[in-house]
Structures are given as structure tokens and as C-alpha cells.
Image (cartoon, helix red, strand yellow):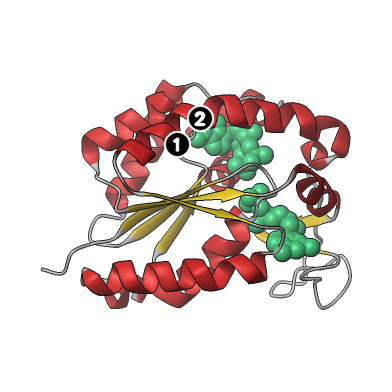
Amino acid sequence: MAKLFRAAIMGPPGSGKGTISQRIAQSFGLQYLSSGHFLREGIAAKTEAGLLVKTYVERSMLVPDHVMTRLMLPRLEQLSGHSWLLDGFPRTLGQALALNNLYQLDLVISLNIPYETLKERLSDRWIHPASGRVYNMGFNPPRVQGKDDITGEPLIQHDDDKPEALMARLRHYKDVAKPVIDLYKSQGILHSFSGTETDRIWPYINSLLSTKMHTQPSDTCQAQTP
Ligand SMILES: Nc1nc2c(ncn2[C@@H]2O[C@H](COP(=O)(O)OP(=O)(O)O)[C@@H](O)[C@H]2O)c(=O)[nH]1
Ligand SMILES: Nc1ncnc2c1ncn2[C@@H]1O[C@H](COP(=O)(O)OP(=O)(O)O)[C@@H](O)[C@H]1O
């Protein structure tokens, strides 16, 4: 059977994880799972998971590791037989170790983007809440202002994308991510990319993935089949 490919993308809020993940999913056919989107979906649908995490997500606090792993690991089990890309999970060392017990990641992408760039991007970020599609009024504006391209539904902004909340979020991200990054570095699977423009970083990621997925045959065709 073809070897499955398993990857994760890390980086501070606004670093382009969602944007790059969408390109990876489209170009390489990986199943894409964003923890933030998954949690918000549960909250909107008032599922058991949604009720459990609501207070944390609404205050931009990390959901405790035991809750997060209890939600995400079964979700990954549903993707067995597919190659996948995780965005936003694992975020802590505890989550990374729990994931490690079940799956060996093939590749972790880490994005290093300067603070000023993050601030500018997030103040301009608009989201279609139902799908998680992300727009930016300068970089990739919707076709009709304030409306999602596919559904025509209204776009929203997250409160915690405002500059006053950003510095604390970034500091917190760095503290929590460091041991996770160190773990993946020690496993030899971490690849870091720095820059201020997604379009300049993307060709390097594209070529890295082409090489990695080419050297180990993947199930990308299966992954695209519903
Ligand atoms: N100006 C600009 N905006 C970008 C670029 N890459 C992504 N964005 C926008 O920056 C915001 C944050 O990107 P996103 O992918 O949501 O980052 P995430 O928080 O790491 O998932 C979104 O509004 C994107 O459309 C870029 O190269 N330039
Ligand atoms: N891996 C995770 N561990 C704990 N909480 C998480 C995780 N992923 C997402 N969350 C929760 O969901 C919220 C939104 O996540 P996300 O969309 O990734 O945005 P951000 O990058 O701003 O944290 C977070 O503020 C947090 O409450």
C-alpha cells in the first residue's frame, strides 16, 4: 500500500498557515484539518465538543491538552487511509507527545514572519465563518466586498485579530511553541521559512513537498476522492 504523508504547519497567528495550507491541500490533495476551524465549527453547531471548548476559544485561551487531544485524535482516526496536513495542532508539547504516540509526522513546516507584517495582515483579515475561508483586503480580497466568493455570505473579523490583543498572543505563541519546535527539530523533520510575503515563500514549500512526497509515494489520489 502507498505510504501516507503526514504533515503539520506551525507559525504565529497571521503567519499564513491557513493560506499556505489551502494551497498545499489544493496542489497535493492532502486532507486539511485546522484545529481553530474545527473548534469554531463545533461551537456554532453546539456539539458536545463545541460546548466543552466555547469558553476557552471565546477568550482566546488554549483549550486544555486533555480536551484537545480527546477531540483531535479521533478526528484524525477518521482520516485513516488519507494523507493529511494539520494546522493549529499540536500547539503544546503535551499535544505533540500525544500525537507522536499514534503517528509519526513526515514533515513540519514552521513560518517565521516579522511582527509588523503580522500586525498589518491581521488588521485586514476577514473570514467566512462557516468554511474558514480567509481573505485579506489587500492580498486576496473577496470578489464582492464583505461577501464570501463561494456562498455570498457575509465575512467577519475576529476580535482577537485587533492590534491590542496581538502582542500578548504572539508572546504566548512563542513560549508555547518553542518546545514543540525543538522536538520536531530533534526528529529532523522541521523546515522553517522566513519572509514577509506568502507568494515568495510558497515556491520553496511547493518544491519541498514535491520532493518529499515524490520520494515516498503517497495516496494523494485517494485523498481527493470523497
Ligand atoms: N498582504 C499579505 N497578506 C497575506 C499574505 N499571506 C497571507 N495574507 C493574509 O494574512 C492574513 C493571515 O493569514 P492566514 O493564512 O489566515 O494566517 P494564519 O493565522 O497563520 O492561519 C489573511 O488575511 C491572509 O489573506 C501576504 O503575503 N501578504
Ligand atoms: N491546538 C490547540 N490547543 C488549544 N487550543 C486551541 C488549539 N487550536 C485552537 N485552539 C483554540 O481555538 C482558538 C482559535 O484557534 P486558531 O484559529 O488557530 O487561532 P489563533 O491562531 O488565533 O490561536 C484558540 O485561541 C484556542 O482557544
Q: Residue drawn at (54%, 73%), measured in percent from left and top?
A: 203
**Residue 62 versus residue 147: which sits nearer the camera?**
62
Does label 1 point to a residue whose CB lies under 8 Å from ligand 2? no
**Residue tagged 1:** 181
**Residue 18 versus residue 190: which sits nearer the camera?**
190
- Which amino acid does the dot numbered 2 rest on? Lys
- Which amino acid does the dot numbered 1 rest on? Ile
Say if residue 149 shows up in the picture: yes
**Residue 96 versus residue 70: which sits nearer the camera?**
96
**Residue 80 percent across, percent down from the top left:** 25, 55
Q: Secondary structure at mark 1?
A: helix
**Residue 42 percent across, percent down from the top left:** 55, 41
Q: Give the left or right position of residue 127, taking residue 12 as reference.
A: right
Q: Secondary structure at mark 2?
A: helix
Q: Are marks 2 and 1 in contact (CB under 8 Å)?
A: yes
**Residue 32 percent across, percent down from the top left:** 45, 59
| Quadrant of res 145 | bottom right
**Residue tagged 2:** 178
Quadrant (top left/top right/bottom left/bottom right) for the N terminus: bottom left
Vertical order, 225 against 4 (above or below): below
**Residue 106 percent across, percent down from the top left:** 29, 53
Q: Give the left or right position of residue 125, taking residue 184 as reference.
A: right
Vertical order, 66 against 209 (above or below): above
Q: Give the left or right position of residue 76, taking residue 49 as reference.
A: left
Q: Which mark is residue 76?
A: none
